Image (cartoon, grey):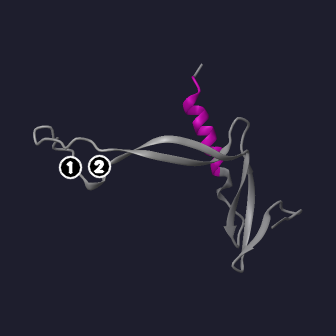
Amino acid sequence: MARSSNDGLWRATLRGRALLGEEVQLPEGYAIAMTTVTTNKTFSPPSPTSASLSTFITPTAEADEIETLDQVSIQACASRYVVWEHDKAPTAAATISQWVTLAQLIHTSSQ
């Protein structure tokens, strides 16, 4: 894996195919994290009676058991990452900045 000096893209190969990568630096105060979720408990809700069933809710097999989260552990953290694309320069790298801008607009009080 090597970074090109003329266009700043990372270059690599995977199974003989060329990969081009663009490094994305996250804004100050943001990080990307790899997490591990540990679940130990299973919650089985009581079976509903016919009187408590709503006409809008239909019971499903997936609703029989609900897992509850016990712990979320952060395994690694970084302030930047690389977006990879086959045979062409990645175009999706700008989307993270659009989401960050949207999150700031939503979670900032208007003055």
Q: Secondary structure at mark 2?
A: helix
Residue type at tag 2: Ala
Residue 100 lies in the magenta-colored region: yes
What residue do we see at 10% from left, 42% from top?
50
Along the line of sight, which residue is nearer the eye, 87 or 45?
45
Packing grade of label 2 (10 A; few <14, some 14-19, many >=20) is few
Q: CA distance from mark 1 to mark 2?
A: 10 Å
Q: In the orientation shown, which residue stands out farthest toward the bottom?
A: 16
Please give the range of residues in magenta.
Answer: 95-109
Amino acid bearing label 1: Thr
**Vertically, is 91 above or below 40?**
below
Q: Position of residue 26 (x, y in %)?
A: 71, 44
55 or 110, which lies in front? 55
Q: Find disc 2 in the rendering and name its residue.
A: 63
Q: Which residue is mark 1?
A: 58
* Coordinates of residue 105 in the picture (x, y in percent): 58, 32
- Asked whether disc 1 touches disc 2, contact meaning CB atoms under 8 Å apart, the reply is no
- Horizontal side of 45 relative to 105 (left or right) equals left
Residue located 31% across and 48% down the image: 65
